[in-house]
Image: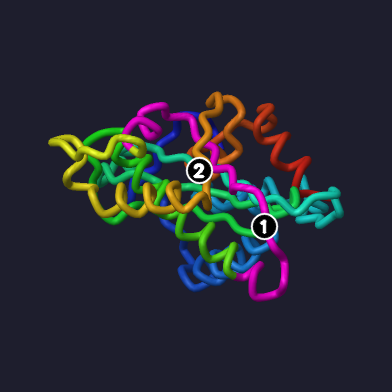
């Protein structure tokens, strides 16, 4: 995707064959199961061109010598130009292998970037709990805290502040949920530089070969 490009409904020339377009989108939805690098982009023909130039990409699971769990998440505040809702994106690794990822528009409009990121944090925390429970069911014990990486320092202050105030009362449920998981010593909140945040590819269009895109593809692709 071209950086900074925003797509609006109704722009451009529509496909003449709507059924063909729907079939193509449906196939791409299935392809996302093994191609996380196309989870965010919306321009269908551009995705097809990208796939044609990189047909061998896919997820490679390897033994990295440990079974730790880590997750990255990000939120594009008010990223949708049509309704100003934010985009949530996250990815979860087990033993250095990508096992879960998602990008989805949030259901409500967030009034600040911290609020949109906190909602995204609640989504990925729920996914972490699910992954952790699945590992327990199959007999895999995760002994260390699950590292949750993000690039907004305000989230740490909100998560550690026991007093809810005007800025956080409307996201109090999410705040309680995150704080509970931190107090249970399930997850560890860790700040990371924006340039090192792997979840960026799930919330915004990136150019053809930025360092962050090459980093995540080198971790999950053949």
Residue 106 among those drawn in magenta:
no
Q: Which residues are magenta?
A: 134-158
Residue at the spot x=35%, y=30% of the render? 157
Looking at the image, which residue sits at the far left? 166
Residue 43 visible in image = no
Residue 136 among those drawn in magenta:
yes
* Side of 164 where 96 appears, left or right: right
Residue for badge 1: 142
Above or below 201: residue 45:
below
Q: Which mark is residue 73?
A: 2
Q: Give the structural element (helix, strand or loop) at label 1.
A: loop
Residue at the spot x=77%, y=47% of the render? 54
Q: Position of residue 147 (x, y in %)?
A: 58, 43
Sequence-first disc among 2 and 1:
2
Q: Tell me which corner region of the image, top left, top right, bottom left or bottom right, holds residue 123.
A: bottom left
Q: Which mark is residue 5?
A: none
Residue at the spot x=65%, y=51% of the render? 69
Residue at the spot x=54%, y=38% of the render? 149
Counting labels gives: 2
Residue 134 visible in image = yes
Q: Position of residue 4 (x, y in %)?
A: 45, 29
């Amino acid at each position: 995707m071209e950086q900074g490009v925003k797509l609006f409904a109704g722009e451009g020339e529509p496909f003449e064959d709507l059924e063909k377009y729907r079939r193509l989108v449906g196939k791409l939805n299935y392809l996302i199961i093994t191609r996380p690098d196309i989870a965010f982009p919306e321009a269908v023909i551009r995705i097809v061109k990208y796939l044609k130039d990189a047909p061998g990409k896919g997820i490679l699971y390897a033994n990295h010598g440990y079974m730790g769990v880590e997750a990255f998440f990000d939120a594009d505040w008010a990223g949708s130009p049509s309704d100003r809702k934010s985009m949530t994106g996250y990815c979860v690794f087990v033993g250095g292998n990508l096992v879960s990822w998602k990008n989805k528009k949030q259901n409500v409009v967030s009034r600040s970037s911290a609020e949109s990121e906190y909602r995204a944090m609640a989504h990925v925390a729920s996914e972490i709990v699910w992954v952790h429970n699945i590992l327990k069911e199959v007999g895999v014990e995760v002994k260390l805290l699950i590292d949750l990486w993000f690039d907004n320092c305000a989230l740490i202050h909100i998560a550690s502040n026991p007093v809810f105030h005007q800025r956080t009362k409307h996201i109090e449920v999410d705040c309680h949920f995150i704080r509970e998981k931190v107090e249970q010593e399930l997850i560890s909140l860790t700040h990371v530089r924006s340039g090192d945040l792997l979840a960026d590819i799930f919330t915004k269009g990136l150019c053809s070969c930025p360092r962050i895109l090459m980093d995540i593809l080198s971790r999950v692709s053949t």
